[in-house]
Amino acid sequence: MGVSGCGKTTVGTLLAEALRCPFLEGDHFHAREAVAKMRSGQPLSDEDRWPWLERLGAATAQSIAEHGVAVTACSALRKRYRDRLRATIGQPVRFVLLDNCRERLLARLTGRAGHFMPASLLDSQLATLERPLAEEEAITLVTEDPPERLRDMVLAQLAGGSA
């Protein structure tokens, strides 16, 4: 989880490979209208997000039922979005917040080609982000290390150790 440009897809793909499980890219579950809205520089409303979260949660639940585990990339910016995902998935869920400073995130977004999410929406996402509460037991990582190191840190924490 995290704002655009934090590394969700990169770290999530590596994590899924290590766990030998499916990787679900949350961006692929957005409605065309939502993608068009973001592409035009408009942030999504909760009404735009609820159906997306339902589709993504259902796909994650199906993947877990079929494979025992899944890795899903999703912004999950607010607690209520994470709660909706947990309820829809119906299985234990661990969130990993990939975090960084605005300047680093902006540099990543402006250096990335072909993505529908414009850098102009970063401040909106940062303003929306509700950092996970202690009871959510999320893993929080600052994305300055190489993606492989971040993957290993997640795997170590999931296993109950430290990285």
Image (cartoon, grey):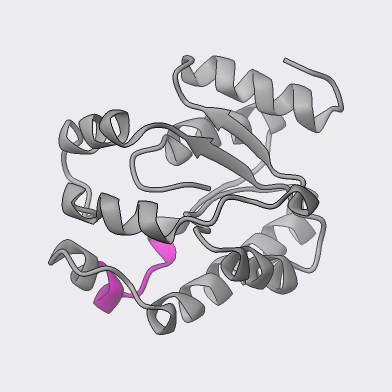
82, 92: nearer the viewer: 82
Question: x and y percent of residue 80 in the render?
Answer: 61, 71
The C terminus: image quadrant: top right
How many discs mark residues in the rendered view?
Answer: 0
60, 34: nearer the viewer: 34
Residue placed farthest to the left in the image? 40
- Secondary structure mostly seen in magenta is helix
The answer to whether 162 appears left or right of 11 in the picture is: right
Question: x and y percent of residue 4 in the render?
Answer: 35, 47
Does the magenta-highlighted stretch encompass residue 32? yes
Residue placed farthest to the right in the image? 160
Question: x and y percent of residue 19 in the render?
Answer: 70, 32
37, 17: nearer the viewer: 37
- What residue is shown at x 64% (from left), y 51% (from top)? 132
* Residue 94, placed above or below residue 35: above
* Residue 50, placed above or below residue 80: below
The answer to whether 96 appears left or right of 44 in the picture is: right
* Residue 155, placed above or below residue 52: above
Quadrant in which residue 116 is drawn: bottom left
- What residue is shown at x 43% (from left), y 79% (from top)? 46
* Residue 50, placed above or below residue 15: below
Does the magenta-highlighted stretch encompass residue 117? no
Quadrant in which residue 151 is drawn: top right
- What residue is shown at x 54% (from left), y 17% (from top)? 148
Q: Give the range drawn in magenta.
A: 28-35
- What residue is shown at x 30% (from left), y 59% (from top)? 124
The answer to whether 41 appears left or right of 14 in the picture is: left
Question: x and y percent of residue 16 in the render?
Answer: 61, 36
